[in-house]
Amino acid sequence: MISVAGIRPASIRSHYQLGTLFYRLLWGPHIHHGLWDADESPYVAQCRLTDTLADLARISTGERLVDIGCGMGGSSIRLAQLRGCSATGVTLSPVQRRWAAVSAGLKGVGERTEFIAADAEQVSFQPGSFDVLWSVECTEHLFDKPAFFRRAIEWLRPGGRVAITVWYEGEDTSRPGHRELCEEVCRRFVCPSLATRADYAGWLKDNGLTVVHDVDWTDRVARTWEICKRRVGRTGVRQLARLIDREQLDFIDGFDALLNAYRTGAMQYGAMVAQKAS
């Protein structure tokens, strides 16, 4: 696992407090990668990622899920709309919490969604509260990933599932520049650490879960950052970031680093679904 010093919870909160505007301008209501099959629009690709993970996790009507790192509520709202489930979203950013709550109300699922501004490593729920622990591109920001999974798996009922997508550290650490590239991504995208697919599978298995899906989507999601780069070039977003906050500028200037990490194998992107014993 690659770890870097100097990342603090306050830095992550500030990134999303200020960065929500940039995410929305550059990408849309879903703060996550798109999953492409062909030449679909970014919005269609973003929805496909949510829908495909939901299919893998077999999310169905009436189930309760907790969405860790819910962002602007994109996944929670879509799953409530299309799958008839109830969702509790957790975000570190009060700005995102408010944005998500308003969006859910406007889209008619305010009664089936709840959004909380809290640290995922501190928030607590009663054991057996949820059918699904859902987290899309959030665990990279956690400081003690094994401890989070130990706690969060207790929130699942027997037979419940964990459904996550993750920025992984690539497993071939012998590649030239591997560590330097991973560390640059961590600094620019405020991630305290990156872990491998094997690390995640081990944490889930250590807590009594069975991994039922472990898929590599790296090649299908990398286009996300190519599109974001083009949009930065066509707009004044970089100049706006320069005026607002240095960390936002570091984030925008980090798109090439993430693309290079995907292309060289220094990083991977994938989905994992695991089930608790019933």
Image: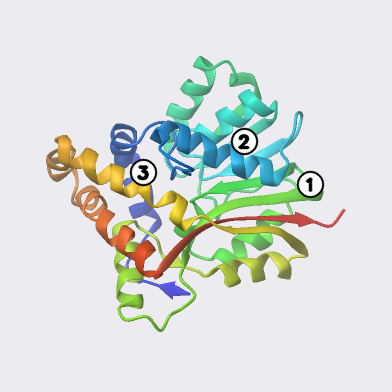
Report x, y in % for residue 155.
Answer: 72, 49
State the scheme by which the image is colored.
rainbow
Q: Nearer the viewer, residue 194 or 42?
A: 42
Instruction: Look at the image and tell me whether residue 116 can be seen.
Output: no
User: Which of the two labelled residues, at mark 2 and mark 1, occupies the earlier sequence position?
Assistant: 2
Residue at the (58%, 15%) spot, across then down: 108
User: Which of the two labelled residues, at mark 3 and mark 2, occupies the earlier sequence position?
Assistant: 3
Q: CA distance from mark 2 to mark 1?
A: 14 Å
Residues at discs 2 and 1 in contact (Cβ within 8 Å): no
Quadrant of the rendered structure where residue 3 is?
A: bottom left
Q: Amino acid at mark 1?
A: Gly
User: Which of the two labelled residues, at mark 3 and mark 1, occupies the earlier sequence position?
Assistant: 3
Per the rendering, the mark at residue 88 is 2
Residue at the (16%, 36%) spot, across then down: 234
Report x, y in % for residue 23.
Answer: 33, 38
Which residue bears the numbered disc 1? 128
Identify the secondary structure beneath mark 3: helix
Identify the secondary structure beneath mark 1: loop
Q: Residues within 10 Å of mark 3 (few under 14, many from 20)?
A: many
Which residue bears the numbered disc 3? 16
Say if 156 sits above or below 25 in the image.
Answer: below
Report x, y in % for residue 199.
Answer: 58, 71
Residues at discs 3 and 1 in contact (Cβ within 8 Å): no
Identify the secondary structure beneath mark 2: strand
Q: Amino acid at mark 2?
A: Thr
Q: Nearer the viewer, residue 144 or 10?
A: 144
Q: CA distance from mark 3 to mark 2?
A: 19 Å
Q: Residues within 10 Å of mark 2 (few under 14, many from 20)?
A: many
Residue at the (68%, 46%) spot, across then down: 56
